Image (cartoon, rainbow, N blue to C red):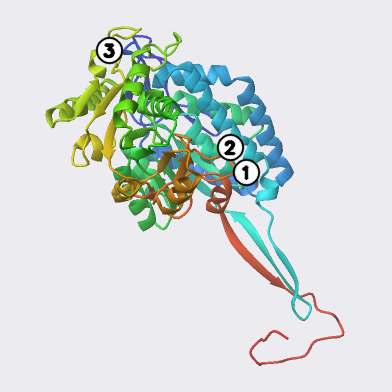
Amino acid sequence: MSTGNDVPVIGHFVDGKRVGGDSERRGDVFDPATGRRTALVELASAADVAGAVESAERAVRAWRDASLAKRTAVLFAFRELVNARRDRLAEVITAEHGKVLADAGGEVQRGLEVIEYACGIPSALRGGFSENVSTEVDSYSLRQPLGVVAVISPFNFPAMVPLWFVPVAVACGNAVVLKPSEKDPSAALLLAEWFSEAGLPDGVLNVVNGDKEAVDALLDHPGVKAVSFVGSTPVARYVHQRASLAGKRVQALGGAKNHMVVLPDADLDLAADAAVNAGFGSAGERCMAISALVAVEPVADALVEKIAQRLAGLRTGDGRRGCDMGPLVTAAHAERVRGYVESGIAVGAVPVVDGRDVTPDGAAEGFWLGPTLFDHVTPAMSIYTDEIFGPVLCVVRVGSYDEAVELVNANPYGNGTAIFTNDGGAARRYQHEVEVGMVGVNVPIPVPMAYYSFGGWKASLFGDLHAHGADGVAFYTRGKVVTSRWLDPRHGGVNLGFPTQT
């Protein structure tokens, strides 16, 4: 449907179809490269959320009993649909988020890898069996679905993050209520439609769009058994606390301040390429972006020069024009990041490249800020301490490996880190000593493959289990152990003594 001025209104997806909601509240959806409002999105009320949960509760009764063969057939069909339509999905991501098409395509590919992992759910759900644990008594373990689970995903990966969770949750026999970011909701709705087309029964996956009101309704609803969340650390902490108090299982992935340590023996050209790729891809709007480069002297001068040279060749502009870096997601966020740039200059950081001076290949009304490189940053500066979530790379100079590790471990975040070196002993020592959940050795963005699990330490994760992989299966299931004896008619009799193993 559309408004009077023909701006479309994006609703929800419940019981296998797109629907409107009861709430009259709506949010704006923009094309970040043009600054133009392209749609309105309905912001769900608590009643809208309750309706989606009720749909999921009805659907999960049959879905949890569906055979593994049936579940995997749906997942294989869904994988084929996403793969065949990956360009369409990437276009939708770019139109609402702003990241360049190549980056959006990479996001879809990483999501596909989790779908493919979920296609192997029969192996992941296998239990154990022990025969004759006592005389003619057997024990075996099962993993069973939780029921209805909620997924609350962020704006920066509107397809990949939902795909981190939804395929695994569904494969395990759960029903899902997904609340994507209201800034770029269309990718999630497309995925829900394609899941339905692949044969997923109505109600097993529902999508409600909304803001904090919808989030709180999901966190409080007694029908929701578990919550998966990705977002900033303050909100992750809030989600974890509120949902835990409501008796739910929670995995809340928070923010990051990812450090890349460059040792004096490193290949500086490789390190400079990596710093640019990891610092400015998706305009720095990644929880795994490198935002702090720790240069172990005497390499800082040469490394900063090489990075600056590479930044001079980057083209910032509309992601549909073959540019290297797109806009930020909203005008407010672009202004926030610009404020950090101004703050860094005010406290004495050296702006080697100032992104405020960029001339974008795009409409003047777009939400632009070019790549920004600061040198001589200290740990006391807000551009170092805060998660900026934008195209700002800070270089911190240290005198030794030990000082670098101490700096990284003192940071309250522990999401991802990388070390660049040609010294295998130093790399092995770093991966052992660093207090971070995901480590790259000469790899700047160490996002694990789908059969491993994604997640950080410290203030980057609230909860015990990480996303996808074995942790994902464990999160979306409960363990059960059965001890059984089928009586031999030759045995029997009453014995009131305490059972013992004989």
User: Mark 2 highlights which residue?
Assistant: 114
Mark 3 is surrounded, within 10 Å at the Cα level, by few (under 14), some (14 to 19) or many (20 or more) other residues, namely some
Asked if residue 38 lies left or right of residue 174, the reply is: left
Q: Which of the two discs, 2 and 3, sits closer to the camera? A: 3
Amino acid type, label 1: Ala
Assess whether mark 3 and mark 2 are in contact (beta carbons under 8 angstroms). Answer: no
User: Mark 1 highlights which residue?
Assistant: 171
| Residue depicted at 46% across the width and 44% down the height | 439
Q: Compared to 105, does 388 lie above or below?
A: below
Instruction: Give the residue furthest to the left.
Output: 346
> Who comes first in sequence, dot 1 or dot 3?
1
User: Mark 3 highlights which residue?
Assistant: 358
Q: Secondary structure at mark 1?
A: helix
Q: Quadrant of the C terminus?
A: bottom right
Q: Position of residue 188 (x, y in %)?
A: 49, 29
Q: Secondary structure at mark 3?
A: loop
| Residue depicted at 40% across the width and 22% down the height | 97
Q: Which of the two discs, 1 and 3, sits closer to the camera? A: 3
